[in-house]
Image (cartoon, rainbow, N blue to C red):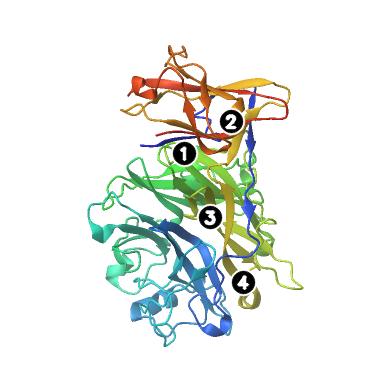
Amino acid sequence: MRQTFLAIDDVSLPWRKNVCLYLEKPTVRLEPVLAPSPVESNAPDNLAAHFYGTVLHDQGVFRMWYYACHRGLNPDWSTHQQQQLAKNPGWLLGKQEGFQVYEGPICYAESDDGIIWRKPELGQVLFKGNRANNALDLPHALICGVAVLRDDEDPDPAQRYKMVYEFMPDQSDPPIAAYGCRPTMACAVSPDGIRWRMTAIPFPNQFIEQSSFIRHQGQYIVHYQVMDSWAGWLAEGGTPCGRTGVARVTYDWDLWPDLTATTYALPEPTDPHLRGMDGAYDQVHLGVGAASFGNVCVGVYGLWHNAAFGENFGHISGDLGLVVSNDGIHFREPGATPGRVFIHRNDSPATPVPGQAFNTILCQGNGILNVGGETRIYHGRWRNCGQHAEDIASYYRGEVALATLPRDRWGALALHPDAGEGSFCTAQITLPADGGTITVNAVGVASLSVDLLDEQFRPIPGMPGGTVKGSDGLECPVIWQKHVLNDLESKMVRIHITLRRNGQVDPRVYALYVT
């Protein structure tokens, strides 16, 4: 398995001298890559295209699953779906007569480049008398988030694609009433990502509002948020706390343990009376939107700038923060400052309305992927126009946005400003059975040298002074003149890299790869 050692990962790269972490800022496209359909289209997403969703780069095609919001009831929903809506009026975004807007269904889009998207006519859902839409046929109408992964490790091609989605249960009849009234998670499978079959509701009547769904180290992991009393189950002494990132995991897709782990939380106020979902302090919205890269996960979380109880909901805004993990469950922020902004809402604002000043809330999902020499961070922009029905009907919007970095360049290890030389060293790693290759993602590679050390930090004979070949780039090979890595097959080592300032050259190392 390819091993990736990112500069932002202080567990894989724990040992440092005279070097600092320098975090990078992504480039954000101002225009959305996917927008709601026009109001007059009567499409399922003619109010919002929310990226509580997923983007995959799948066999050369970019594929997106997102949840829609629409104006006006779809009279063609099945009886059970209409009962979901009738029994749960609190989930209607606008509740006054003439301003009714609804969440759901899940919709699908495709793209050749990940920037210009098309909404194919799938013909699955009869919506306001028309099947020429991109909605997916699932048994629930009130759906508020979707996360999809392609699972090539499953031998059953009928389960090649797996989905979890958030829904509001139908309270209409005994078989469904057992699922309770809280929004929760349903599981579904598909052979192609288009035709889906719901398979389970593993946590009936337990609140789950997921942000991402990944496969990491043999586990299926769902990331989501809890809040107030639910978050209190995880806090010391059961005290109240605000929005908190948590996870559910399983090794068996058909059997989910009823256990929860905390994944990431921001500090709570010291005064317990100020804590909770309605406290006016920063909280973790939706949990972690994670992506697995083999031995490491990178994620973004919603940095929710909350309003106090009784204040206008429209005052709330949201940025995205950056986190990293090795087990895919417990995440930490690079550097020492919790709550640092990675993508600011002002850098990725929701499409503005002339004469209005609405806040943007950025939202994350299954949106991080590497494509060629680029890392992409798809995310959502929620135009927060408050909770008045008239404003929702006129101004509410959700759209999908894109930020990019050169591949894996989340941050760099570089010399302290006062140092002319410094170094860093990996944790213990096991080389591949054939010795493998080591490459470096860096700039200023001519000013780097690489030594291999044993588990106790002693130089391995014949392996000091490796040089990095080629020009600056994403994968520059490390070469030793007298030895090759084949001589060290399956050996446990540490990689030690020295950086030297050479005139105007200030080397920066973003990642190491062992393949």
Q: Nearer the viewer, mark 4 or mark 3?
A: 3
Comparing 56 with 41, the one in front is 56
Comparing 265 with 161, the one in front is 161
Tell me the SS state at disc 4.
loop
- Residue type at numbered disc 2: Val
Say whether disc 4 or disc 1 marks the residue closer to the N-terminus: 1
| Mark-to-mark CA distance, 2 and 3 | 34 Å
- Name, please, the residue furthest toward the bottom: 129
Q: Mark 2 highlights which residue?
A: 445
Q: Mark 3 highlights which residue?
A: 364
Instruction: Kindly identify the residue that appears in the image at 58 percent across and 42 percent down.
Output: 266
Are the two marked residues, 2 and 1, in contact with CB atoms closer than 8 angstroms?
A: no
Q: Mark 1 highlights which residue?
A: 330
Query: Does residue 413 appear in the picture of this structure?
Result: yes
Say whether disc 1 or disc 3 marks the residue closer to the N-terminus: 1
Tell me the SS state at disc 2.
helix
Mark 2 is surrounded, within 10 Å at the Cα level, by few (under 14), some (14 to 19) or many (20 or more) other residues, namely many
Query: Does residue 491 appear in the picture of this structure?
Result: no
